[in-house]
Image (spheres, rainbow, N blue to C red):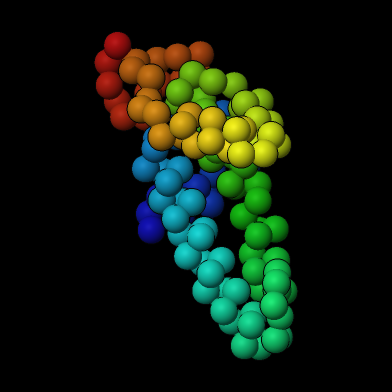
Amino acid sequence: MNWYLEVLQKYAVFEGRARRSEYWYFTLFNLLISIFLGIIDGFLFDSQGFGLLRGVYSLAVFIPGLAVSVRRLHDTNRSGWWLLLGLVPIVGWIALIVFMVQDSQTGENEYGQNPKGLAA
């Protein structure tokens, strides 16, 4: 839960680097909260698709999600522009998942110090 809150505290911070755990825990909690809000939407508003609560939540976490994704790419020594690869169906998504699961680049890179604190 701390990783999720840390990402929210860095609401629109696109500089620096993010560890794998920071990115994936944020993604996991996003998924769980979205499922929970979808269930509540279904009961309260009888919605079959994208409900009101889940829509508001998604808008609220869009910028932090984008920021942590950019920082995660920085950690693997890639520009945040690589996120645009996600616009390519299937192949782009798979490539982004591969980038996100890769280990941090050891030492310092052009985006800052390694968040793991490893020396080069």
- Residue beneath the point at 64% across and 82% down: 42
- Outermost residue on the front side: it is 90
- Residue beneath the point at 71% across and 80% down: 47
| Quadrant of the image occupied by residue 13 | top right
| In this view, 20 is above or below 110 | below
Q: How many marks?
A: 0
Q: Point out residue 120 in the picture as x, y percentages from the top left corner.
A: 30, 11
Residue 16 in sight = no
Question: Is residue 11 left or right of 120 when viewed as pictured?
Answer: right
| In this view, 28 is above or below 71 | below
Residue 112 in sight = yes
Which quadrant of the rendered structure holds the N terminus? bottom left
Question: Is residue 23 left or right of 64 when viewed as pictured?
Answer: left
| Quadrant of the image occupied by residue 81 | top right
Q: Point out residue 78 in the picture as x, y percentages from the top left corner.
A: 54, 20
Question: Is residue 23 left or right of 66 when viewed as pictured?
Answer: left
- Residue beneath the point at 65% across and 47% down: 63
| In this view, 3 is above or below 93 | below
Question: Which is more toward the observer, 89 or 45?
Answer: 89
Q: Point out residue 62 in the picture as x, y percentages from the top left corner.
A: 65, 51
Q: Point out residue 25 in the picture as x, y percentages from the top left corner.
A: 41, 51
Question: Which is more toward the observer, 15 or 24?
Answer: 24
Question: Is residue 104 left or right of 42 when viewed as pictured?
Answer: left
- Residue beneath the point at 45% across and 23% down: 76
